[in-house]
Amino acid sequence: SAQNSTSHGLTATTPDSLAEANQAEFLALAARLRAQLKPHGPAEEETFAAYAWNTFQADRARAFEAHASAAYEEALLDDSPTQDSPTQDTLLRRLDTLSKYRTRLERAASRSFRDLGHLQADRLAANETNALLKDIGQNEPISPAIPTSSLRQKARQPNPHSLAQDHILGLGLAKGGQDAQQQPISQERSN
Protein backbone atom coordinates (compact mmCIF):
# COMPACT_ATOMS: atom_id res chain seq x y z
CA SER A 1 0.00 0.00 0.00
CA ALA A 2 0.97 3.64 -0.22
CA GLN A 3 1.89 3.73 3.46
CA ASN A 4 4.33 0.80 3.34
CA SER A 5 7.30 3.04 2.64
CA THR A 6 6.59 5.01 5.80
CA SER A 7 5.47 2.13 8.06
CA HIS A 8 8.34 -0.31 7.51
CA GLY A 9 10.39 1.32 4.73
CA LEU A 10 10.88 -1.91 2.74
CA THR A 11 9.56 -0.33 -0.44
CA ALA A 12 11.80 2.72 -0.08
CA THR A 13 14.31 3.15 -2.88
CA THR A 14 16.81 5.41 -1.11
CA PRO A 15 18.11 5.72 2.46
CA ASP A 16 16.84 9.30 2.64
CA SER A 17 13.29 8.08 3.26
CA LEU A 18 14.32 6.07 6.33
CA ALA A 19 14.56 7.18 9.94
CA GLU A 20 17.93 8.61 10.94
CA ALA A 21 18.86 5.51 12.97
CA ASN A 22 18.21 3.29 9.96
CA GLN A 23 20.19 5.64 7.72
CA ALA A 24 23.14 5.35 10.09
CA GLU A 25 22.85 1.53 10.04
CA PHE A 26 22.80 1.57 6.24
CA LEU A 27 25.86 3.83 6.04
CA ALA A 28 27.77 1.55 8.44
CA LEU A 29 26.88 -1.55 6.40
CA ALA A 30 27.77 0.20 3.14
CA ALA A 31 31.15 1.23 4.58
CA ARG A 32 31.94 -2.37 5.63
CA LEU A 33 30.89 -3.73 2.24
CA ARG A 34 32.85 -1.03 0.38
CA ALA A 35 36.01 -1.88 2.34
CA GLN A 36 35.63 -5.52 1.33
CA LEU A 37 34.45 -5.16 -2.30
CA LYS A 38 36.41 -2.04 -3.33
CA PRO A 39 34.27 -0.79 -6.25
CA HIS A 40 36.09 1.32 -8.83
CA GLY A 41 34.57 3.63 -11.43
CA PRO A 42 30.99 4.77 -12.03
CA ALA A 43 29.55 1.43 -13.23
CA GLU A 44 30.96 -0.49 -10.28
CA GLU A 45 29.90 2.27 -7.86
CA GLU A 46 26.32 2.23 -9.14
CA THR A 47 26.14 -1.56 -8.98
CA PHE A 48 27.72 -1.54 -5.52
CA ALA A 49 25.15 1.01 -4.31
CA ALA A 50 22.32 -1.27 -5.49
CA TYR A 51 23.95 -4.26 -3.77
CA ALA A 52 24.49 -2.41 -0.48
CA TRP A 53 20.93 -1.01 -0.45
CA ASN A 54 19.24 -4.31 -1.30
CA THR A 55 21.38 -6.19 1.24
CA PHE A 56 20.43 -3.69 3.94
CA GLN A 57 16.75 -3.85 3.03
CA ALA A 58 16.80 -7.68 2.91
CA ASP A 59 18.32 -7.73 6.42
CA ARG A 60 15.54 -5.43 7.63
CA ALA A 61 12.89 -7.56 5.92
CA ARG A 62 14.23 -10.66 7.72
CA ALA A 63 13.94 -8.85 11.06
CA PHE A 64 10.36 -7.72 10.31
CA GLU A 65 9.51 -11.23 9.13
CA ALA A 66 10.87 -12.77 12.35
CA HIS A 67 8.81 -10.33 14.41
CA ALA A 68 5.66 -11.07 12.37
CA SER A 69 6.27 -14.81 12.70
CA ALA A 70 6.57 -14.50 16.48
CA ALA A 71 3.34 -12.44 16.59
CA TYR A 72 1.55 -15.08 14.51
CA GLU A 73 2.76 -17.92 16.74
CA GLU A 74 1.66 -15.94 19.79
CA ALA A 75 -1.78 -15.41 18.25
CA LEU A 76 -2.09 -19.15 17.61
CA LEU A 77 -1.44 -19.85 21.29
CA ASP A 78 -3.67 -17.05 22.59
CA ASP A 79 -6.82 -18.58 24.07
CA SER A 80 -8.58 -15.26 24.69
CA PRO A 81 -7.71 -12.64 22.06
CA THR A 82 -9.02 -9.13 22.61
CA GLN A 83 -10.89 -7.09 20.04
CA ASP A 84 -7.77 -4.98 19.49
CA SER A 85 -5.64 -8.04 18.71
CA PRO A 86 -4.98 -8.62 15.01
CA THR A 87 -6.62 -11.75 13.67
CA GLN A 88 -4.61 -14.78 12.70
CA ASP A 89 -5.55 -14.13 9.08
CA THR A 90 -4.26 -10.55 9.26
CA LEU A 91 -1.01 -11.71 10.83
CA LEU A 92 -0.61 -14.47 8.25
CA ARG A 93 -1.13 -11.98 5.38
CA ARG A 94 1.42 -9.64 6.95
CA LEU A 95 3.90 -12.51 7.26
CA ASP A 96 3.30 -13.50 3.63
CA THR A 97 3.81 -9.92 2.42
CA LEU A 98 7.05 -9.55 4.38
CA SER A 99 8.28 -12.87 3.01
CA LYS A 100 7.67 -11.60 -0.54
CA TYR A 101 9.55 -8.36 0.18
CA ARG A 102 12.47 -10.32 1.65
CA THR A 103 12.64 -12.66 -1.33
CA ARG A 104 12.54 -9.79 -3.84
CA LEU A 105 15.25 -7.88 -1.97
CA GLU A 106 17.50 -10.94 -1.58
CA ARG A 107 17.24 -11.65 -5.31
CA ALA A 108 18.03 -8.04 -6.18
CA ALA A 109 21.05 -8.09 -3.84
CA SER A 110 22.27 -11.36 -5.32
CA ARG A 111 21.88 -10.02 -8.87
CA SER A 112 23.77 -6.82 -7.99
CA PHE A 113 26.55 -8.80 -6.31
CA ARG A 114 26.93 -11.03 -9.38
CA ASP A 115 26.91 -8.00 -11.70
CA LEU A 116 29.55 -6.26 -9.58
CA GLY A 117 31.75 -9.36 -9.79
CA HIS A 118 31.42 -9.40 -13.58
CA LEU A 119 32.31 -5.71 -13.81
CA GLN A 120 35.35 -6.17 -11.61
CA ALA A 121 36.52 -9.24 -13.54
CA ASP A 122 36.13 -7.31 -16.80
CA ARG A 123 38.09 -4.37 -15.40
CA LEU A 124 40.94 -6.60 -14.28
CA ALA A 125 40.99 -8.52 -17.58
CA ALA A 126 40.99 -5.26 -19.57
CA ASN A 127 43.85 -3.93 -17.42
CA GLU A 128 45.91 -7.07 -18.09
CA THR A 129 45.21 -6.91 -21.81
CA ASN A 130 45.94 -3.18 -21.96
CA ALA A 131 49.28 -3.72 -20.21
CA LEU A 132 50.19 -6.27 -22.86
CA LEU A 133 49.06 -3.97 -25.66
CA LYS A 134 51.22 -1.22 -24.20
CA ASP A 135 54.20 -3.60 -23.96
CA ILE A 136 54.02 -4.26 -27.69
CA GLY A 137 53.63 -0.60 -28.56
CA GLN A 138 49.88 -0.48 -29.22
CA ASN A 139 48.11 2.56 -27.86
CA GLU A 140 44.53 1.44 -28.59
CA PRO A 141 43.36 0.31 -25.12
CA ILE A 142 40.41 -1.95 -24.44
CA SER A 143 37.71 -0.25 -22.37
CA PRO A 144 37.02 -1.80 -18.96
CA ALA A 145 33.34 -1.58 -19.93
CA ILE A 146 33.84 -4.29 -22.55
CA PRO A 147 33.17 -7.77 -21.10
CA THR A 148 36.82 -8.76 -21.56
CA SER A 149 36.78 -11.67 -19.11
CA SER A 150 33.76 -13.27 -20.78
CA LEU A 151 35.29 -12.67 -24.21
CA ARG A 152 38.34 -14.61 -23.05
CA GLN A 153 36.17 -17.48 -21.86
CA LYS A 154 34.05 -17.58 -25.00
CA ALA A 155 37.14 -17.58 -27.19
CA ARG A 156 38.69 -20.16 -24.84
CA GLN A 157 41.66 -17.84 -24.52
CA PRO A 158 42.33 -17.35 -20.83
CA ASN A 159 45.71 -15.96 -21.80
CA PRO A 160 45.65 -12.15 -22.09
CA HIS A 161 48.36 -12.43 -24.81
CA SER A 162 45.84 -14.13 -27.12
CA LEU A 163 43.18 -11.51 -26.45
CA ALA A 164 45.67 -8.69 -27.04
CA GLN A 165 46.77 -10.28 -30.32
CA ASP A 166 43.14 -10.67 -31.43
CA HIS A 167 42.53 -7.03 -30.53
CA ILE A 168 45.51 -5.92 -32.63
CA LEU A 169 44.54 -8.10 -35.57
CA GLY A 170 40.96 -6.91 -35.40
CA LEU A 171 42.07 -3.31 -35.57
CA GLY A 172 44.65 -4.00 -38.28
CA LEU A 173 47.33 -2.54 -36.03
CA ALA A 174 49.93 -5.29 -36.29
CA LYS A 175 53.33 -4.11 -37.45
CA GLY A 176 54.53 -5.04 -40.91
CA GLY A 177 51.28 -5.89 -42.72
CA GLN A 178 49.94 -9.42 -43.37
CA ASP A 179 53.10 -11.33 -42.37
CA ALA A 180 53.15 -9.66 -38.96
CA GLN A 181 49.49 -10.49 -38.38
CA GLN A 182 50.32 -14.17 -38.53
CA GLN A 183 53.23 -13.92 -36.04
CA PRO A 184 52.47 -14.63 -32.41
CA ILE A 185 52.91 -11.69 -30.05
CA SER A 186 55.91 -13.34 -28.37
CA GLN A 187 57.76 -13.37 -31.74
CA GLU A 188 56.71 -9.82 -32.40
CA ARG A 189 58.21 -8.70 -29.07
CA SER A 190 61.59 -10.22 -29.91
CA ASN A 191 61.75 -8.35 -33.27
Image (cartoon, grey):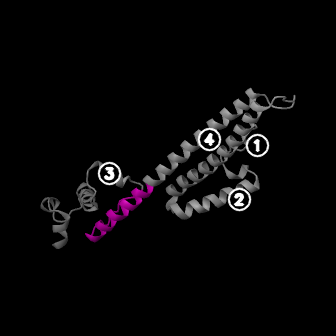
Which sits earlier in the primary sequence, circle 4 or circle 1? 1
Which sits earlier in the primary sequence, circle 1 or circle 3? 1
Q: Where does residue 6 sit, x and y in percent of width and height?
A: 76, 43
Q: Is mark 2 on a helix, strand or loop?
A: helix
Q: What residue type is labelled 1?
A: Thr
Q: Which amino acid does label 4 sit on?
A: Arg
Cα gap from disc 4 to disc 1, whole angstroms? 17 Å
Q: How many marks?
A: 4
Q: What element carries label 4?
A: helix
Badge nearest the viewer, 2 or 4: 4
Cα gap from disc 3 to disc 4, whole angstroms? 35 Å
> In this orientation, which residue lies closer to the viewer: 48 or 169?
48
Q: Which amino acid does label 2 sit on?
A: Ala
Q: Decide: marks 3, 4 in contact (CB < 8 A)?
A: no
Q: Decide: marks 2, 3 in contact (CB < 8 A)?
A: no
Which sits earlier in the primary sequence, circle 2 or circle 3? 2
* Screen quadrant of the C terminus: bottom left
**Label drawn at residue 57:** none
Q: Residue at x 38, y 53 (%)?
A: 146
Residue 82: in magenta span: no
Magenta stretch in the rendered image: 119-144
Q: Which residue is drawn at 67% across and 47% down?
A: 60
Question: Which residue, given by chain and number where applicable, does mark 2 sit on?
Answer: 24
**Label drawn at residue 6:** 1
The crowding category of the residue bearing disc 2, from other C-alpha atoms within 10 Å (few below 14, some 14 to 19, many at least 20), is few
Which sits earlier in the primary sequence, circle 2 or circle 4? 2
Question: Which residue, given by chain and number where applicable, does mark 4 sit on?
Answer: 102
